[in-house]
Amino acid sequence: MQKDMESSLKARKGGAFRLNLHPKAYFDGNPYKSDKPLPPLKESRKPPEIVKPFKPSSPAKEIGGMKAGCFDNYPSHSQDPYMPKKKKESDGEKKIFRPSQGPKSTRTRSIINQNVERRINNLNFRQPITVSI
């Protein structure tokens, strides 16, 4: 019997198979932890020197500022007479409106109401069938 046990132990390749499914005390290690060393700290920048604001030596040469590619001032608007729209003369009676023939759209009952009407009838209206999803 003992020889069988020893031969069985020698035949095994490793220890007992264990699934690591038992609960752990805390979370796993930090997933963001890195083994690489941090880079050296950069020196902080010096605050910029205070500079005097730009002041042009003389005022603008042209009146009106930006010309946007035009050499002359904007031309004055010519006075065009406003022509009112002419009304069309009607020849007596207007045509009578007649809607097109064919099937028309109509109101429909909601799906919930349709299902209620299918499931509840005069035999079971006092104790309706409940349906769970």
Image: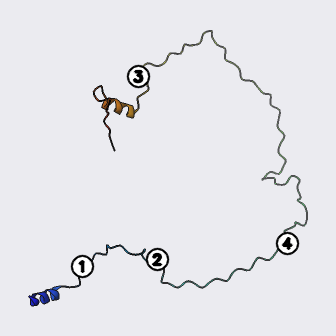
Label number found at residue 30: 2
Which quadrant is home to the C terminus? top left
Asked if the residue under mark 3 is in contact with the one under mark 1, i.e. CB atoms within 8 Å, the reply is no
Q: What element carries label 2?
A: loop
Measure the alpha-carbon separation of dots 1 and 3.
75 Å
Q: What type is the residue that disc 1 sits on?
A: Phe
Label number found at residue 52: 4
Mark 1 lies on residue: 17
Q: Is mark 1 on a helix, strand or loop?
A: loop
Q: Is mark 4 on a helix, strand or loop?
A: loop
Q: Which of marks 3 and 2 is nearer the N terminus?
A: 2
| Callout 3 crowding tier (Cα within 10 Å): few <14, some 14–19, many ≥20 | few
Residue at 29% of width from left, 30% of height from top?
A: 124
Q: What type is the residue that disc 3 sits on?
A: Pro
Residue at 56% of width from left, 13% of height from top?
A: 95
Q: Is residue 34 left or right of residue 71?
A: left
Mark 3 lies on residue: 103
Compare residues 42 and 63 and report the one nearer the observer: 42
Q: Nearer the viewer, mark 2 or mark 4?
A: 2
Q: What type is the residue that disc 2 sits on?
A: Asn
Q: Which of marks 1 and 4 is nearer the N terminus?
A: 1
Residue at 60% of width from left, 85% of height from top?
A: 40
Residue at 77% of width from left, 76% of height from top?
A: 48
Q: Earlier in the sequence, mark 4 or mark 3?
A: 4
The residue sitting at the left extreme is 1
Q: In which quarter of the image is residue 109?
A: top left
Q: What type is the residue that disc 4 sits on?
A: Lys
Residue 15, percent across and down? Answer: 23, 84
Measure the alpha-carbon separation of dots 2 and 1.
27 Å
